[in-house]
Image: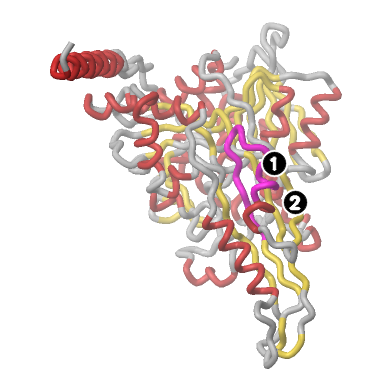
Amino acid sequence: MNLFSRIFKFIKLIAAMLILLTIVLVYRAINSTPDNSHVDKVSAIPLDYQQASKRLAGALRYRTISYQDPSLSEPQEFMGFQEYLRISFPLVHQTLSNEKVNSLSLLYRWKGQNKSTHSPILLMGHYDVVPVDPSTLDSWQHPPFKGVVAQNKIWGRGTLDDKSAVLAILESVEYLLSQGFVPNRDIYFAFGHDEEIGGKQGAKVIAEHFKQKNLKFEYVLDEGGFVTEGMMPGFDLPLTLIGVAEKGYLSAKLSVQSEGGHSSVPPPSTSIGIISNAIVSLENNQFEPRLVTATESMLTTIGRNMPFNKRLVFANLWLFKPFLIDQLKQSKLTNATIRTTTAATVFNAGEKENALPINASAIINFRLLPGDTIEMVEQHIKRVVNDDRVNVEILIAGNASPISSTESVAYQNIVNAIDKVSPEQGMVIVPNLMVGGTDSVHFLSIAENVYRFNGVKIEPESFSGFHGTNEYLAVSEYQRAINFYYQLLLTNQ
């Protein structure tokens, strides 16, 4: 066989492989069709939503702040909030058994008519909030703890995270009780007081209480996912995210101690400089991005609802994964779903402008992808910093959660409840890896599945309110949340 014949044969082989590849890609895209099965929409329950909004606004006036320094806590604010709930939801407190856990967390049990039929379920929320940066007070349209309803919005710290969920759940239960409804199974409600600092005195103690009673749940529903629009680059349809897993959490303290002295005779690098170099090294050496199962599932579901040219890509992640990862890296929101993130959050050093600092420290917060472990992150820190002068101390750490099933009846019930109360056309409901953390992690060992969804829609402009300035929730979205929990409770009777 001459050279020309061999080349021609090679070209034919390549052409055949390309044709076969094209067939595979197109076939997978054609078969990646959207799920058009939707339930019928339902009318909102006949509740006075303006009054409900005012009740939520009233709850925001209690400064139930979780501080890292427990000496700053104001327990009277928490107890005031508890009394406010008792007065605002009389049927709940007359009918459901309720108790205080560690004085400040709240646990309710709605006894079912036939609890042996199904395992109980647990709906969660938390009523503590993060502090407000005093330097931002002038930037708030309404004071963060005034609890104002204006411009068809409810303003104040806790409207998104997470008093709205607590109040919306209670509003739905109060209405169901007024209609004489009794569930078939036991339903529990747990409202923690310290989620913002890990939930160790609230949710964790409640979980231990359940363990002692050998009580297991079909599923737990906590905060986390939202209805979104305009937050996924290149995707125009409304997108609802149900958290089926959450990233791990690790905070490391880097510290340096030096001799100090007068600033007129400085060493080559001060303690501030040493710590700064360590931070820069960590920021310049990020963890490698990758797609985990929950994110792949989200992208595949989204892809089914895209035009054919984009569906071709999403239906063939095995080939186009590097391209998608590169695209996801471009936005800080999507970048957080594909890597263990690194964030310097606290820095302390120096007392006087002409004195060399003796001690300098910084806290670096990492959010761990499933598969990345605490040990891996600790080794990464030490390897990247590579400076014996820098002490590394792990302050708090927890691995990522397991991924809950999207095939369960519970997941489908949540999907149906969302669909029933959502007015948006063409909504796509997808599983999601939650980049933040919740105190539902304390219940992982006593629940078949743990899901995360708040029941409301957020937009890019309101997203910054989480732990930030001008936190608010539209009255219409609070109505959606109440109706979501109502439909979910009806479904799970």
- Residue 449 is inside the magenta segment: no
First in sequence, mark 2 or 1: give its number. 1
Instruction: Give how far across and how far down residue 53 sits, in percent.
Output: 50, 45
Left/right placement of residue 138 relative to residue 326 reads right
The crowding category of the residue bearing disc 2, from other C-alpha atoms within 10 Å (few below 14, some 14 to 19, many at least 20), is: some
Does 259 sit above or below residue 354? above
Quarter the N terminus occupies: top left
Instruction: Give how far across and how far down residue 130 sits, in percent.
Output: 63, 55
Instruction: Give how far across and how far down residue 196 sits, in percent.
Output: 67, 49
Quarter the C terminus occupies: top right
Is any atom of residue 84 visible in this view?
no
Q: Quadrant of residue 260?
A: bottom right
- Residue 375 is inside the magenta segment: yes
The disc placed on residue 394 is 2
Is any atom of residue 452 visible in this view?
yes
Q: Are marks 2 and 1 in contact (CB under 8 Å)?
A: yes
Q: Residue at x 61, y 25 (%)?
A: 177
Left/right placement of residue 27 relative to residue 148 reads left
Q: State the residue position of label 1.
A: 374
Q: Quadrant of residue 110?
A: top right
Task: Give the structural element (helix, strand or loop) at label 1.
Answer: helix
The crowding category of the residue bearing disc 1, from other C-alpha atoms within 10 Å (few below 14, some 14 to 19, many at least 20), is: many
Amino acid under label 2? Ile
Residue that extends furthest to the right in the rendered view of this protein: 212
Q: Residue at x 73, y 33 (%)?
A: 442
Left/right placement of residue 240 relative to residue 347 reads left
Front position in the image: 29 or 37: 29
Front position in the image: 305 or 371: 371
Amino acid under label 1? Ile
Q: Residue at x 79, y 80 (%)?
A: 259
Q: Which residues are the magenta region?
A: 363-380
